[in-house]
Amino acid sequence: MRLLVVTQKVDRKDPILGFFHRWIEEFAKRYKFVTVVCLEMGEYHLPANVKVLSLGKEEGKSRFKYILRFFKYIWQERKNYDAVFVHMNQEYVLLGWKFWKLWHKKIFLWRNHAKGNWMTKLAVLFSNKVFCTSPSSYVAKFKKTIIMPVGIDTDFFKPDPSVIRKTGSVLFLGRIAPVKKVLEFVDWLKTENFETATIVGSALPKDLWYEKKVHERVWTNGLNSKVKFVAAVTQEEARKLYQSHETYVNFTPAGSMDKTIIEAAACGTKLHVRNPDLREFRVESHSLHALFSDLERALS
């Protein structure tokens, strides 16, 4: 089978979406040809049977031009794919479904947000199957939805005996945003006996006000001498942080299976999480191998 993958970004160095580069590599192993349409393109090194097409965000294109390019690509490549895998963004299903149905292309949607709306319901209706990793995800309630492993590369995220794990060290790693409950994490630190804490991540422009509040809360809680801030990091840098910290803390609520929790566990870091869906799990059951074994069956 040949596959069209529609995703936000193809950039192996991206701190948030860099993991998807590895997913594309796995798709390339299992399918004759993979065409990837992304909103934004950065650095990538992919097999010869992968073609990457960008909608142009890295060039500063307008939203109107994104849409025009989207229709252009799905038309010009229509003979090069048999099915469509839309990652996270339901909008692409809503834009393309009529054409894909007309051309007899199966539509598969991966969506893992806790909240949804009427557009989400339409995207689910137009999709052949829907995937998510959390039973608390908005789309988990639909009959056509399949619960999937998170898909962590356990050959990459693993303990390293040569890296010294500092006693009493606490790590928070993720986007600085209200949904990640970073302020709650800072308040929790005030009640805990720890040596050092590292808050790793950056805020989107719309959440800069929240990032400022986090810095202020660290100061007002008298923790500025023990808390270090680090901007968003690459996958390689994240792995070193997991390996060198004793405890990883994540307060993201139920609704999405935050992959950083599985990454930290795979690196041997102790966990303190508040998502009830992730208090007990086996790392192997959320590995990249487990995910693509399930995906291969579901996409057939």
Image (spheres, rainbow, N blue to C red):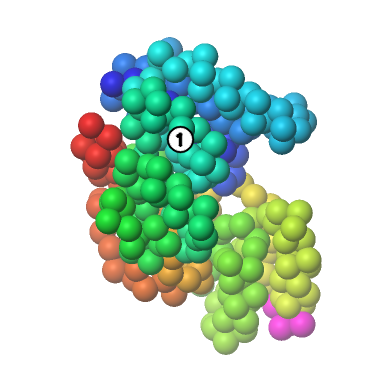
Instruction: Answer few, some or many: residues within 10 Å of disc 1's Cα (few below 14, many 20 plus, some between 14 and 19).
Output: some
In magenta stretch: residue 221: yes
Horizontal arrangement in the rendering, residue 68 relative to residue 127 (left or right) = right
In magenta stretch: residue 14: no
Horizontal arrangement in the rendering, residue 290 relative to residue 189 (left or right) = left
Could you say which is closer to the camera, residue 43 or residue 254? 254
Q: How many marks?
A: 1
Q: Residue at 50% of width from left, 68% of height from top?
A: 252
Give the image quarter of residue 204.
bottom right
Give coordinates of residue 180: x percent, y percent.
57, 66
- Give the residue at mark 1: 97
Above or below for 185 versus 50: below
Above or below for 107 versus 260: above
Which amino acid does the dot numbered 1 rest on?
A: Trp
**Looking at the image, can residue 16 be seen?**
yes
Q: Which residues are magenta?
A: 220-224
Above or below for 72 versus 129: above
Q: Residue at 59% of width from left, 27% of height from top?
A: 70
Give the image quarter of residue 243.
bottom left
Give coordinates of residue 38: x percent, y percent.
56, 31
